[in-house]
Amino acid sequence: MKIPKQLITLTKEHHLSLSLANKAINAKKLDNEMAICQQIAKNFKRDFLSHFSFEEQYILPLLKQNNQQDCQRIINEHKQLLKLAKDINANNLLEFGALLKTHTRFEDRVLFKQIPADSLHKIPT
């Protein structure tokens, strides 16, 4: 399925978030929990806050009328991910990774496909 040009940047960023999620999930096996926690604490807010804001400002309004529950889920997960990243440690690293992975996949596989084709022009490229 071809990705609409308005969603290409978001889907590229989702590839990076899935990579980070997998690193967080596998950190214990690789014995590098501390390094991943430091990376997340240092970079997550900087790297993802604008991504989250863009989705909330441009994507969710296109879906809210017909999908209030999923839109609220996305907002809640954005807040939870930022909170976990701020207080990241070996004890919540797996939770962070799992949430980031399911969140990203939900957006790509479910939410973005619900955007009406005639509304895509409202998303800045």
Image: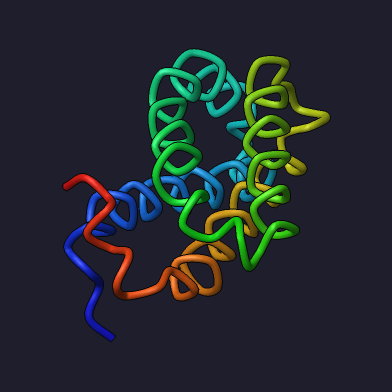
Q: From the viewer's perspective, is residue 29 above or below residue 83?
A: below
Left or right of 74? Residue 61 is left
- Of residue 31 and residue 50, the one placed in the foreground of this image is 50
Report x, y in % for residue 9: 24, 50
Instruction: Kindly give the residue lying farthest to the bottom in the view shown.
Output: 1
Residue drawn at (22%, 69%), measured in percent from left and top?
A: 4
- Of residue 117 and residue 14, the one placed in the foreground of this image is 117
Q: From the viewer's perspective, is residue 1 above or below residue 121?
A: below
Report x, y in % for residue 64: 60, 56
Residue drawn at (39%, 44%), measured in percent from left and top?
A: 58
Residue drawn at (45%, 75%), measured in percent from left and top?
A: 113
Report x, y in % for residue 71: 64, 53
Left or right of 31? Residue 51 is left
Q: On the rendered image, what quadrant is the N terminus found in? A: bottom left
Instruction: Kindly give the residue lying farthest to the right in the view shown.
Output: 91
Q: From the viewer's perspective, is residue 38 above or below residue 33?
A: above
- Of residue 73 and residue 41, the one placed in the foreground of this image is 73
Residue drawn at (44%, 19%), measured in percent from left and top?
A: 43
Report how many numbered discs are placed on residues in the image: 0
Report x, y in % for residue 106: 59, 65
